Every structure is written in structure tokens, then in C-alpha cells.
Amino acid sequence: MRRLRILTNSLFVSATAALLLAGCPEISESTGGPVDTCVEAGVQCRYAPGKIGVCFANTENEIVCRSQH
């Protein structure tokens, strides 16, 4: 029983360390930043100068940019 607890604790510590060391990618690495033209729903887009939006499919099945707020 003690061995199982030690093994479980070791795995937890190892997994936590791996997640902390990996970290999150920068926006420029993962998405390249907001797009000017929407081609896929769920992607960040430039809604207006200085404003970020999100691409979504409207009722006419068009992919358009709308404000996040």
C-alpha cells in the first residue's frame, strides 16, 4: 500500500512539473494573431480598428466577424 502511494505521488509530481515546464504557447506561435478575413468559426478576427472579434457562422451559414463584447 505504501509503495502505491509513493508511486502515485511520484507520478503526480512528474506530471505537474511537465505541465509547468511546457507552459502555454504565445499567441503568435499558436494562431498567428487575429485574422482579417474569417474562413473558420471560433478564430479571433479584427472586428474594427483596435477591437478583436471572433469568427462565427450566422443564420445564412456565412462565416463573419462579430464583436466579443
Image (cartoon, rainbow, N blue to C red):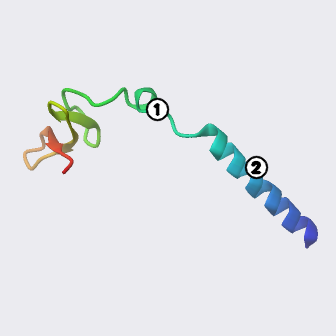
Residue closest to the eye, 10 or 60: 10
Q: At label 2, which amino acid type do we have?
A: Ser
Q: How many residues crowd mark 1 within 10 Å: few (<14), some (14–19), many (20+)? A: few
Which image quarter: residue 22? top right
Residue 3 position within the rendered picture, expressed as x and y whole percent measured from the top left: 92, 65
Q: Which mark is residue 26?
A: 1
Helix, strand or loop status at disc 1: loop
For the point 18% across and 27% down, the residue is 37
Indicate the quadrant containing the N terminus: top left, top right, bottom left or bottom right: bottom right
Report how far apart the C-alphas of labels 2 and 1 lie in the structure: 24 Å
Helix, strand or loop status at disc 2: helix
Which image quarter: residue 8? bottom right
Relative side of 19 to 39, left or right? right
Residue most extreme to the bottom: 1
Q: Earlier in the sequence, mark 2 or mark 1?
A: 2
Residue 2 position within the rendered picture, expressed as x and y whole percent measured from the top left: 92, 70
Q: Is residue 5 above or below residue 22?
A: below
Residue most extreme to the left: 60
Relative side of 2 to 52, left or right? right
For the point 44% across and 31% down, the residue is 30
Pointer 2: what residue?
14
Residue closest to the eye, 58 or 46: 46
